[in-house]
Amino acid sequence: MRNLPWTSILAWLLAAFFVVGGIGNIFVSTEIAADYRRWGYPDWFHYLTGALELAAAALIAYRPTRLWGAGLATAVMVAAALTVLWHGEFAHAIPPLVVLAVALTVGFLTRRDRQAA
């Protein structure tokens, strides 16, 4: 079996996170829909969020577009973190900030690998 570098594994885990998140936002629960309303977003906004998350996952999974995917993932997580921080939900900011750090790491490593090649 071929050895996968840890950077690829990290990228695939990030892509998997965004697949799960994208599906969860497209087929939103009543609790999450209430969160979106409480934050002031329109009723359709969770579809946009889910679509962006699925797009980020697809871009991250495909090595030639991984840097673009990491950039989109970063933008989505910045928006998520700012939303909950703006509304004073500081404990809810931890997961998006952790995923933001992973997305930035994947982007940095992808860029480094491209420059080395």
Image: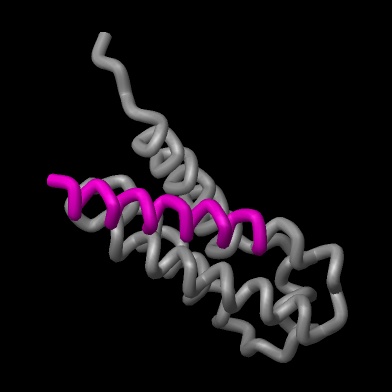
User: Where's the N terminus, which quadrant?
Assistant: top left
Q: Vertically, is 65 above or below 81?
A: above
Q: Vertically, is 13 above or below 55?
A: above
Lateral position of residue 109 relative to residue 91, left or right:
left
User: Where's the C terminus, which quadrant?
Assistant: top left
Residue that appears at 46% across and 53% down: 105
Q: Vertically, is 70 above or below 38?
A: above
The image quarter containing residue 10 is: top left
Which residue is situated farthest in the top direction here?
Answer: 1
Q: Is residue 114 rendered magenta in the image? A: yes
Which residue is situated farthest in the left direction here?
Answer: 117
Task: Where is residue 60? Give x, y as percent.
Answer: 34, 52
Q: Which residues are magenta?
A: 97-117
Q: Is residue 52 rendered magenta in the image? A: no
Residue that appears at 28% across and 56% down: 111
Lateral position of residue 117 relative to residue 79, left or right:
left
Residue nearest the observer in this picture, 43 or 108? 108
Residue nearest the observer in this picture, 37 or 114? 114
Lateral position of residue 18 relative to residue 31, left or right:
left
Task: Where is residue 22? Give x, y as percent.
Answer: 51, 58
The image quarter containing residue 38 is: bottom right
Residue that appears at 31% across and 46% down: 61
Q: Could you tell me how many numbered marks the image carries?
A: 0
Residue nearest the observer in this picture, 64 or 104? 104
